[in-house]
Image (cartoon, rainbow, N blue to C red):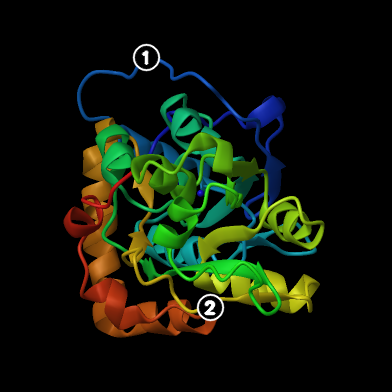
Amino acid sequence: MADGWFTRRRFLGGAAALGGGLVLGSSLTGCAELPTGDTGKAMLNELRSAGVARLAIGNEPPYTQIKTDGSVTGAEPEVARAVLRMMGIDDVQGIITPYEGMIPGLNARQWDLITAGLYMNRSRCAEIIYSEPDIVSTESFALRKGNPTGIETLADVKADSSITIAVLAGGYEDGLLRTEKVPRGQISAVPDGRSGIEGLQAGRVDVFLLPTLSLRELVADNASDIEVSPPVPDIAPTGSGVGFRKTDGYFRDLFNEKFQELKDSGEFAAIIEPWGFPADEAINTTAEELCQAPG
């Protein structure tokens, strides 16, 4: 579960999608060779000319969501849409892709930005650059009703080798468990949130680790027999911003400048808070701080 980019302009499969439309992205395992120098100004000109930026998303509400008409919404895409319009880029197109494919796909120029709630950590910040945070969140466990295994902390999981914990493949939580040296045999990687909940219900896993708000939405929609724990006390709050290629620093810096204007006007809070994320926590946290998170 987590960078600006491409010189592209040719949409996946060669089909030009209308602004705001949905494209299904494939998972990439390799990175294209990156150009030398800062290409951010060229990227800005290309996206202004095209009138649309392509966003890698995960279709994981409230971070990202595809509407019934195929258009993209969610906390991070809506923030990006507002900032990009201030930069002269009129619309966005959502491309659903697995989390583990987002950074390789960005560097391979399959999309222009990552707006998926791809949480910052040390390894990701070594590969791409982020905007200042637009989301700061906590992590929780999904558990069967009554918490029959008595799991309350990550330490509880590590202490009991019989416990199996589900995470999204390639997600922030996957990297966190590796960093915290949770044995691989205890970890079950699932492709999406619904699969994690179904694994709990079927007894294939004992606990599902995901951001608190994501789990609450999943459980409210799908699972009366599942409960969501309070924020896990031994996992620090985490956060995300828009991701860019390292070679697009000019574009990222201009994005941050306009993003600050959005914050100062109060519009950022109006966009982000209806999705359940407090604006103040993001405003008072820096990307530099979040990039120190393990993983």
Q: Nearer the viewer, residue 269 or 148?
A: 148
Farthest-out residue, top: 33
Q: For this view, does 246 lie left or right of residue 110?
A: left
Vertical placement of 32 versus 4: above or below?
above
Indicate the quadrant containing the C terminus: top left, top right, bottom left or bottom right: top left
* Residue depicted at 39% across the width and 56% down the height: 88
* Residue depicted at 34% across the width and 42% down the height: 179
Mark 2, other Cα within 10 Å: few <14 / some 14–19 / many ≥20 = some
Q: For this view, does 257 lie left or right of residue 63?
A: left
- Which kind of residue does numbered mark 1 sit on? Glu
Residue 229 position by quadrant: bottom right
Per the image, label 1 sits on a secondary structure element best described as loop
Residue 33's tag is 1
Percent from the top left, x then y, of residue 153?
Answer: 43, 66
Percent from the top left, x then y, of residue 43?
Answer: 36, 36
Percent from the top left, x then y, of residue 96?
Answer: 64, 45
Q: Is residue 71 visible?
A: yes
Q: Nearer the viewer, residue 3 or 237?
A: 237
Single out the mark in the foreground, 2 or 1: 2
Percent from the top left, x then y, of residue 116?
Answer: 50, 53
Residue 232 position by quadrant: bottom left
Mark 1, other Cα within 10 Å: few <14 / some 14–19 / many ≥20 = few
Q: For this view, does 89 lie left or right of residue 14?
A: left
Name the residue that disc number 2 marks. Answer: 275
